[in-house]
Amino acid sequence: MQQILHTIGAGDDLTEVISAFLGRVSSIFDAQLESDLAPVAVLVKHVEAYRGKMLRPTLVGLCGLAVNPSVELTREHAVIGAVCEMVHMATLVHDDVLDEAETRRKGLTVNRLRGNEPAVILGDLLIAASYHLCSQLQDQRAALAVGHASMVMCQGELLQLHHRDDFSLDEKTYFAIVERKTAALISTACELGASRGGASNEIAGRLAGYGRKLGIAFQIQDDVLDLTGEEEVVGKTLGKDLEKGKLTLPLIHHLTNVTGKDRGRSLLLLEEACEGHERSSDAAATLRRAVVETGSLDYARSVALRLVSEAKSEIASIEQSAAKSGLLAAADAVVNRSL
Amino acid sequence: MQQILHTIGAGDDLTEVISAFLGRVSSIFDAQLESDLAPVAVLVKHVEAYRGKMLRPTLVGLCGLAVNPSVELTREHAVIGAVCEMVHMATLVHDDVLDEAETRRKGLTVNRLRGNEPAVILGDLLIAASYHLCSQLQDQRAALAVGHASMVMCQGELLQLHHRDDFSLDEKTYFAIVERKTAALISTACELGASRGGASNEIAGRLAGYGRKLGIAFQIQDDVLDLTGEEEVVGKTLGKDLEKGKLTLPLIHHLTNVTGKDRGRSLLLLEEACEGHERSSDAAATLRRAVVETGSLDYARSVALRLVSEAKSEIASIEQSAAKSGLLAAADAVVNRSL
């Protein structure tokens, strides 16, 4: 995200402020996970390599500044940023176990390097550490909000698992999953950044709405990249959605709009694309082409664009500032990214 | 545990008070996990079947009463009881995934019934729900203590995983694992029960010490049962420690004390007893007999008994009451249980 601020030409001052803020977030993050037990320290070290764009802490910082540009970001903001990033890291570690993913951020995953068992417990450690960190704040509203968002995320993930290999999954259920799985924590990061910066409930609610829309758009872009991205660019194992029988927005649109024999063919390809099938990569490639041909990839992109535009509208009433420009640019960057 | 209070003939009044308290704990537990998403509700339902002795909530209640027999247990106590039980349930669900266990509390495990993936996320949901519940308390000291205990538990588990198949594991490392993995949460349950009941730091510390010793003794008894118990009585898959290359106290003692050719034979049996080996159950049975023959089972039992006696000494200075008798009896029950 910081590189996104660079790329989009956000002001140097803002880039510098957020860069310093992310430095504080990283220090808090690392200190919280320090351990004098060597096997624990070694595992925790892997998590550092997972840290990438730091989208959630960046949003905590930008939202804090956007609601009160004259005030500096507090330690509370940095702690909340670290907490959100830690919860997010925990879900990445566990997701990689569930998805049997081999690479993440251009490196090997914890499960690939160390096995599933340490990866599951490392995820648990990250969750526990995030809550422990959050409970150190004077005000427990952040802990309550993060706890709630984490519950909602798990519920979204369970809903998704329930619908695995469900080729009749509709858009409504898709959005019910994504709102919970991806958008809830991003929304909470924005809301807490704003409210802990002194925003009124109304403004904090607007920023929560911004985060929610941005989060859904982010997931749709992930769906698009899983179908079209290049592994070397994205830096993680791709095509896993198909393999794991997870229906993404482009696929849902495709299956809803393709008819007759073509539909039968796509359903067959979908089944073949699932894991364990010997022709799975051929089937996936053919299916990808079919999805493009029915305009379903364009459709998904247009939905993401609409959500980005809605996210920007949510914060229309907030006074102009460098941080607000950063939030607007971050929304655009979500759908323009190739990684 | 409630049945333990029955079995050991704790006063009817105390049994009734704790029984009512556990009822409140269960209501809070269930309400916190309610979901309007059917697939989530179905999974959460499995957790009910996991609930057994409710050792941790019972200790929260007993410690609360022991430090202040004239005062009634508060809602805060019940919430803390539910939080500790929920964290414990999360570890059971994840442990069963790691151990590939098939049965728990005489029923099939979540991973066996629903697969590893929902089981991992269900565990995550339980952790998130426990912290969310804890953050609802006015005072965040409980959240801080539970968060810390949870981190320590994960560190213990990681240490144990690191030493899997390490046949030279010594007692010191064994105790470092058990203190973290099992004793930390039990100790925290006792400490919070006492401190939230108005105990001084000194008395709360004593009860934390009681919980710590009791927790270690509890784990040693688990080790003993894993070697000697009957699956139908214990109600969970046994022999998993051996299969999974986890060295238990009786085995560590055996390997330390057996010499020459016999030691070589035991090491070979240990390797054969590990998972995937076709003669693993024969090897395990032979090894069990060898452990008994070197007096290592008796040794482990004696260590557990010593810890129980130390746990009881920790609370010697606490005024006599029905709750204190309950705590003393609970300590005895830990090593007398066959399940």
Image (cartoon, coloured by chain):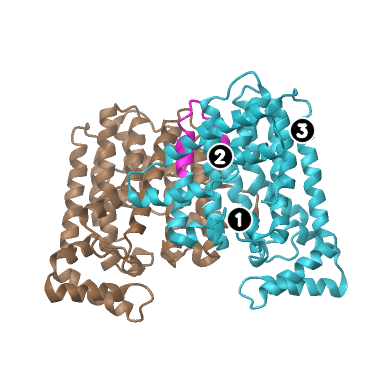
Chain colours: A cyan, B brown
**Dot 1 or dot 3, earlier in sequence:** 1
Q: Which is nearer the eye, A181 or B23?
A: A181
Residue at position x 52%, y 48% in the image = A90
Report whether A162 appears left or right of A283: left
Q: Say which chain tag 2 marks.
A: A
Q: Is residue A78 magenta?
A: no
Q: Gap in Å between the C-alphas at discs 1 and 3?
A: 32 Å
State the SS at label 3: helix
Q: Which residues are magenta?
A: A128-147
Q: Gap in Å between the C-alphas at discs 3 and 2?
A: 22 Å
Residue type at tag 1: Gly
Residue A199 location (% of width, % of height): 66, 23
Image quadrant occupied by the C terminus of chain B: bottom left
Residue at position x 29%, y 59% in the image = B222
Q: Which is nearer the eye, A103 or B169?
A: A103
Residue type at tag 3: Glu
Q: Say which chain tag 3 marks.
A: A
Q: Which residue is mark 2?
A: A84
- The correct choice, above or below, for A71 with respect to A20 in the image is above
Q: Which residue is mark 3?
A: A314
Q: Which residue is mark 1?
A: A235
Residue B150 location (% of width, % of height): 41, 44
Q: Is residue A130 magenta?
A: yes
Residue at position x 42%, y 34% in the image = B144
> Can the viewer see residue B19 in this picture?
no
The disc placed on residue B267 is none
Residue type at tag 2: Cys
